[in-house]
Every structure is written in structure tokens, then in C-alpha cells.
């Protein structure tokens, strides 16, 4: 599968089979993240692989009222990768100009992992709803690190189809004219 095929095939999978993700595949997914580019090559990230059922069951706990039902399905997932970051000196300098390079860096690395997982037939779902203080406590994350996002992984409960992993239909996407300008805001692409 080429990268563009993986991009088109990826879906947010929220129902997983009980099959565990093999260690070799977990390492391959992590390697994809390790190889991601980062601001000044600082690689100021750390990834926590969580496959302990008791820890996974605690992830949806202590979230903001009203969001627990949104992420309650996580408790049945076989694997979660927690993407953490810390700020390097170059991130602080970029921040002086309003840039959040540390968030860009961790996002690129996690996306590399998601696309590699997709290529391997493993479903994923990005998670932004979580209680950072609670997760830092149960996962023993040092104070100097922040959690950017979680990626839930596992083999989809439903068979995959040519249209998408886990048999999930594609979601509607805006067309390019709605999201792209050429040379200046509001000017359409000449092609």
C-alpha cells in the first residue's frame, strides 16, 4: 500500500476485535513515529505504549462531564499509544513568534504511526478528550512532559473493505476550492 492509499483507507475505528497487536507490528509503528521530522531535529517527544487492560480501562475516567460517553469505548481497546512532548529551546524561541512547533512535531510523529498502522491493517482513532492530570498520574509521566494526544489501536471488529479499514464508510470531505487559496486568501487555484 502506498502512502496515498493509506491516507484514503484510514478511518477512525472505535470497535476492535479481541486480537492483540503483535509486538513486531507495535515496534514497526513506533519506528514510523521515531523517523518523523521535528523542529531542529529535537525529537522532544516520548511515547507510552499501554496494553495493560486495567490501565486502559482507567483512561476514560475522570474526564470532563459530558465527554465520558464520547470515549467510553476506549476501555475495550487492546492498545493505546500516548503521545507526550516537552519543549526544547527551539520551541520556546518559535513560541516568541506565535508558533507551536512542539505540537506540530508530536502531531507529525503520531500521524506517521497512524499511517503505518493503517498499512498493517490495524485500526486507529485519535483521542483529544482525556484528563491529562489523571493520565499523568496513572502512567507516572514526569511533570516536564505534557500529553498532546492518544492514539487507540487494534484490529477492527468488522472486516475491512476496499473503501476503508474496518468496513467504515468514508466521511464527507470539503472540496479543495473550500479549503485552498492560491497566492492570497480567496483566490482559486488556476488548475
Image (spheres, helix red, strand yellow):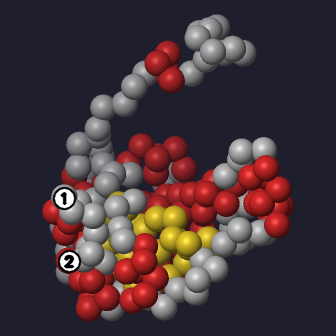
The percent coordinates of residue 11 (x first, y second) are: 33, 51
The percent coordinates of residue 88 (x first, y second) are: 77, 69
Q: Secondary structure at mark 2?
A: helix
- The image quadrant of residue 138 is bottom left
The percent coordinates of residue 164 (x first, y second) are: 30, 49
Q: Where, quadrant-wise, is the C terminus in this rendering? A: top right
At label 2, counting other C-alpha atoms closer than 10 Å, the crowd grade (few under 14, some 14-19, many 20 or more) is some
Q: Residue at x 82, y 61 (%)?
A: 90
Residue 175 in the figure: left or right of residue 4: left
Q: Residue at x 46, y 51 (%)?
A: 6
Q: Nearer the viewer, residue 80 or 93?
A: 93
- Could you tell me if residue 188 is visible in this image? yes
Q: Residue at x 29, y 38 (%)?
A: 171
State the count of labels. 2
The percent coordinates of residue 85 (x first, y second) are: 62, 71
Residue 126 in the figure: left or right of residue 101: left
- Sequence-wise, which precedes: disc 2 or disc 1? 1
Q: Nearer the viewer, residue 98 or 175?
A: 98
Q: Nearer the viewer, residue 2 or 81?
A: 81
Q: Residue at x 30, y 32 (%)?
A: 172
The residue wearing badge 2 is 76
The residue wearing badge 1 is 66
Task: Kindly report which numbered mark, 2 or 1, lies closer to the viewer in this rendering.
Answer: 1
Return the mark for residue 56.
none
Residue 187 in the figure: left or right of residue 61: right
Distance between the Cα atoms at labels 2 and 1? 19 Å
Contact flag, marks 2 and 1 (Cβ < 8 Å)? no
- Could you tell me if residue 15 is visible in this image? no
Q: Secondary structure at mark 1?
A: loop
At label 1, counting other C-alpha atoms closer than 10 Å, the crowd grade (few under 14, some 14-19, many 20 or more) is few
Instruction: From this view, report whether residue 120 is shown above or below residue 103.
Output: below
- The image quadrant of residue 55 is bottom left
Amino acid at each position: 500500500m502506498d502512502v496515498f492509499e493509506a491516507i484514503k483507507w484510514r478511518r477512525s475505528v472505535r470497535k476492535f476485535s479481541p486480537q492483540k497487536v503483535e509486538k513486531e507490528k507495535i515496534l514497526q509503528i513506533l519506528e514510523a513515529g521515531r523517523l518523523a521530522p521535528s523542529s531542529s531535529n529535537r525529537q522532544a517527544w516520548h511515547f507510552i505504549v499501554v496494553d495493560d487492560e486495567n490501565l486502559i480501562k482507567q483512561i476514560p475516567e475522570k474526564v470532563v462531564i459530558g465527554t465520558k460517553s464520547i470515549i467510553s469505548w476506549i476501555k475495550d481497546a487492546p492498545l493505546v499509544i500516548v503521545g507526550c512532548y516537552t519543549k526544547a529551546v527551539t520551541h520556546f524561541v518559535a513560541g516568541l513568534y506565535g508558533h507551536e512547533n512542539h505540537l506540530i512535531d508530536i502531531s507529525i510523529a503520531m500521524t506517521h504511526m497512524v499511517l503505518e498502522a493503517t498499512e498493517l491493517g490495524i485500526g486507529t482513532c485519535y483521542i483529544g478528550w482525556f484528563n491529562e492530570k489523571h493520565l499523568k498520574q496513572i502512567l507516572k509521566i514526569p511533570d516536564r512532559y505534557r500529553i498532546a494526544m492518544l492514539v487507540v489501536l487494534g484490529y477492527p471488529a468488522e472486516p475491512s473493505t476496499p473503501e476503508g479499514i474496518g468496513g467504515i464508510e468514508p466521511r464527507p470531505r470539503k472540496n479543495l476550492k473550500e479549503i485552498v487559496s492560491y497566492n492570497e486568501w480567496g483566490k482559486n487555484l488556476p488548475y
